[in-house]
């Protein structure tokens, strides 16, 4: 029997595993980097061991340090979570060689599926349907579009869709460079790209006695940069017979590699066609939707299998529908740029929320941008979708910019509500889904709340005051609002001020009474779901940057600079000049205009803060 589990991971998944361990009276051990010294998973564990350093390569990817930590803390088992070393066969062997229980599949099974090219060979031999890889040198116009994929790793890294034959060589090189940086393996391959395909997967659990259970299906088609955003179980609107074929193929895949534990077999589904993509030999981020529909605890099952228990009888029957949305600290309107800073408040009441953060925690630059997973369950799909969208819309999220508005709009989009979505959903609809819809009265409510707070200390005047002005910035631009202190209280043009307190303002607008909840954190003001930054009354001329300045959109590391780029280089508008890496993603900084690079202030490996000046491009004078 397992008595103490070290989770070789961080954040939300570490907290998730700890929760089940506590319910089973199993002692918990965390590992933490210097950046995670005060992180939630570090705080809630029974014991915690420091991994010196901040980056993943210094800490969570150091298998020898984690095994040593488990032995030092007296753990008798290791759970890898997902990401980091969860699909590393050498790490699994090191855990077993140290006399510890490995809460995962056999190293040989991990190894069999570690390379997507090798996995496809095994699955083809087992009769599992798949897309045959293409020879990159032999791809023709007739083969397009194609997908370039990294042979190792996941999470969308090293993956490119190619629609023009002339782009293939460059995309192969770019994908290989990204894969080498992310996984230490630059091997890539090419396969046909299926337009309008759906990403459907099967959760399997296998014991060490030959039993394999398939737990329904999940649809994970809504993705950004090939990374999942919204997932649900069961996969809706599958053609007749497809679910049975998926279960059969997933079970065959597990048996072929003598699998044990929890895993996921992923497929591309287009109409009646089913194609094997890959097998994730670990727990998935989206496992909660399967837990909700089947009424199981998949982490508890992992622990049970690791202890040698049998899966008796048949798996439980599914009931109802569950939908999960990944809440990211990122700005979808700005090329999904990750965001950092203090998370002042995070509350999504009424549904399941799996998170690695609490109010007041800091979101840093070193790790994934996911804040939480919001999961709603209901008897029907329509009810579950409505419940999740409503919960997210009412959520209190004070801190960095998030994708909350995008999630709500996605869940209410006609293609999603009618189950007609596919993996190109955001390629088609991102612009519409991120179109600004500012609340024009939020800045006024912020100003009135602030004015009320000041009046409590300054007192009311006997005579009407001069108009007061406040300036704010939001994601939609700058706003200037005006109001007055009068004998009757606060007034503003065009609206009736029914009440104004420091935390609540009530206005009557065109005959409709509206409430505005107001919270202030330093120079940030949150009015309902609108985030505002207080601006000085008069702009500071010293804060202006020269035309053509390229500023860092987020804190991160300079991953690379375009070949041959130096001061004096001629550049074309849109040319990629600098690549920043932040929160496990690469972001291109492109030339804003055709001209000359007059300054280059960074070098590869350099850490930069948000707003840092990276380079300057002087625009070419018009003819």
Image: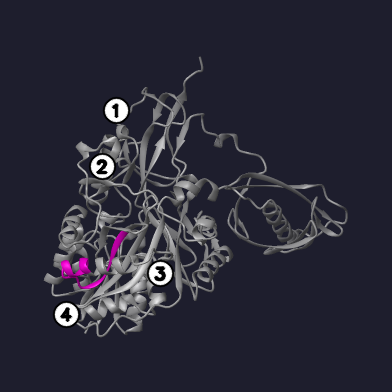
Element under disc 2: helix
Gap between marks 3 and 2, in whole Å? 37 Å
Q: How crowded is mark 1: few (under 14 residues within 10 Å), some or many (20 or more)?
A: few
Report which residue position mark 1 lands on.
564
SS of the residue at dot 4? loop
**In this figure, which residue is indicated by the disc labeled 3?**
234
- Which residues are the magenta region? 252-267
Residues marked 2 and 1 touching at CB (< 8 Å): no
Residue 448 position in % (x across, y down): 73, 56
Q: For mark 2, what is the residue?
A: 177
Q: First in sequence, mark 3 or 2: give its number.
A: 2
Q: How far is disc 1 from disc 3 in space, using C-alphas?
A: 51 Å
Q: What element carries label 1?
A: loop
Q: Which residue is drawn at 59% across and 53% down?
A: 523
Relative to 287, residue 600 above or below: above
Confirm whether the magenta stretch covers residue 261. Answer: yes
Give me the C-alpha separation between circle 3 and circle 4. Answer: 27 Å
Mark-to-mark CA distance, 2 and 1: 17 Å
Q: Is mark 3 on a helix, strand or loop?
A: loop
Residue that mark 4 sits on? 209
- The Cα–Cα distance between marks 1 and 4, rounded to whole angstroms, is 58 Å
The percent position of residue 596, horizontal first and vertical second, equals: 41, 23
Q: Which residue ends up furthest to the left in the rendered image?
A: 97
Q: Which of marks 2 and 1 is nearer the N terminus?
A: 2
Q: Does the magenta run of residues contain 97? A: no
Q: Nearer the viewer, mark 3 or mark 4?
A: 3
**Residue 577, quarter of picture:** top left
Q: Disc 3, disc 2: CB below 8 Å?
A: no
Q: Colour scheme in the image?
A: one colour
Q: In this view, does 260 lie to the left or right of 228?
A: left
Query: Which residue does the image show at 26% across and 58% down from the upper left?
Result: 276
Would you say residue 38 is visible in this rendering? no
């Amino acid at each position: 029997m397992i008595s103490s589990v070290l989770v070789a991971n961080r954040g939300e998944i570490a907290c998730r595993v700890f929760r089940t361990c506590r319910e089973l009276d199993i002692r918990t051990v965390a590992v933490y980097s210097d950046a995670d010294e005060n992180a939630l998973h570090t705080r809630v564990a029974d014991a915690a061991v420091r991994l010196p350093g901040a980056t993943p390569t210094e800490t969570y990817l150091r298998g020898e340090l984690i095994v040593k930590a488990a032995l030092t803390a007296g753990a008798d088992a290791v759970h890898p979570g997902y990401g980091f070393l969860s699909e590393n066969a050498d790490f699994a062997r090191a855990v077993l060689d140290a006399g510890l229980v490995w809460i995962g599949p056999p190293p040989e099974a991990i190894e069999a599926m570690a390379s997507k090219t090798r996995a496809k060979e095994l699955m083809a031999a087992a009769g599992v349907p798949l897309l045959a890889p293409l020879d990159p040198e032999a791809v023709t116009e007739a083969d397009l579009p194609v997908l370039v994929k990294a042979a190792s790793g996941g999470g969308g890294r090293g993956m490119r869709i190619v629609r023009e034959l002339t782009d293939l060589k460059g995309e192969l090189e770019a994908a290989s460079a990204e894969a080498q940086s992310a996984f230490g393996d630059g091997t890539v391959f090419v396969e046909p790209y299926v337009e309008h395909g759906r990403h459907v997967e099967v959760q399997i659990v296998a014991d060490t006695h030959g039993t394999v259970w398939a737990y329904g299906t999940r649809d994970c088609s809504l993705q950004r940069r090939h990374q999942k955003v919204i997932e649900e179980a069961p996969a809706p609107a599958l053609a007749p017979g497809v679910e049975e074929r998926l279960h059969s193929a997933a079970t065959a895949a597990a048996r072929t590699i003598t699998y044990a534990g929890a895993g996921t077999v992923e497929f591309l589904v287009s109409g009646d066609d089913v194609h094997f993509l890959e097998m994730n030999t670990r727990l998935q981020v989206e496992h909660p939707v399967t837990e909700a529909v089947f009424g199981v605890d998949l982490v508890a099952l992992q622990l049970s299998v690791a202890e040698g228990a049998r899966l008796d009888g048949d798996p439980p029957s599914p009931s109802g529908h569950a939908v999960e949305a990944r809440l990211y600290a990122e700005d979808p309107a700005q090329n999904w740029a990750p965001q950092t800073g203090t998370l002042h408040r995070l509350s999504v009441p009424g549904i399941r929320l799996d998170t690695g953060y609490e109010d007041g925690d800091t979101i840093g630059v070193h790790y994934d941008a996911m804040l939480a997973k919001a999961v709603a369950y209901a008897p029907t799909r329509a009810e579950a979708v409505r419940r999740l969208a409503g919960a997210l819309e009412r959520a209190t999220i004070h801190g960095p910019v998030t994708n909350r508005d995008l999630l709500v709009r996605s869940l209410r989009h006609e293609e999603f509500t009618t189950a007609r979505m596919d993996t190109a959903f955001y390629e088609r609809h991102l612009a519409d889904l991120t179109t600004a819809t500012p609340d024009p009265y939020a800045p006024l409510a912020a100003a009135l709340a602030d004015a009320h707070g000041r009046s409590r200390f300054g007192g009311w005047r006997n005579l009407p005051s001069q108009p007061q002005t406040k300036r704010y910035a939001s994601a939609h631009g700058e706003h200037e609002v005006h109001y007055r202190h009068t004998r009757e209280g606060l007034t503003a043009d065009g609206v009736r001020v029914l009440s104004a307190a420091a935390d609540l303002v009530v206005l009557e607008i065109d005959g409709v009474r509206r409430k505005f909840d107001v919270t202030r954190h330093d120079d940030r003001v949150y009015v309902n779901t609108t985030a505002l930054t207080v601006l000085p009354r008069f702009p500071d001329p010293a804060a202006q940057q020269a035309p053509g300045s390229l500023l860092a959109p987020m804190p991160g590391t300079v991953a690379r600079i375009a070949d041959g780029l130096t001061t004096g280089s001629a550049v074309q508008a849109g040319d990629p000049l600098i690549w920043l890496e932040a929160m496990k993603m690469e972001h291109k900084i492109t030339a804003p205009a055709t001209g000359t690079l007059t300054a280059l202030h960074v070098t590869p490996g350099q850490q930069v803060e948000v707003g840092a000046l990276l380079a300057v491009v002087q625009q070419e004078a018009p003819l």
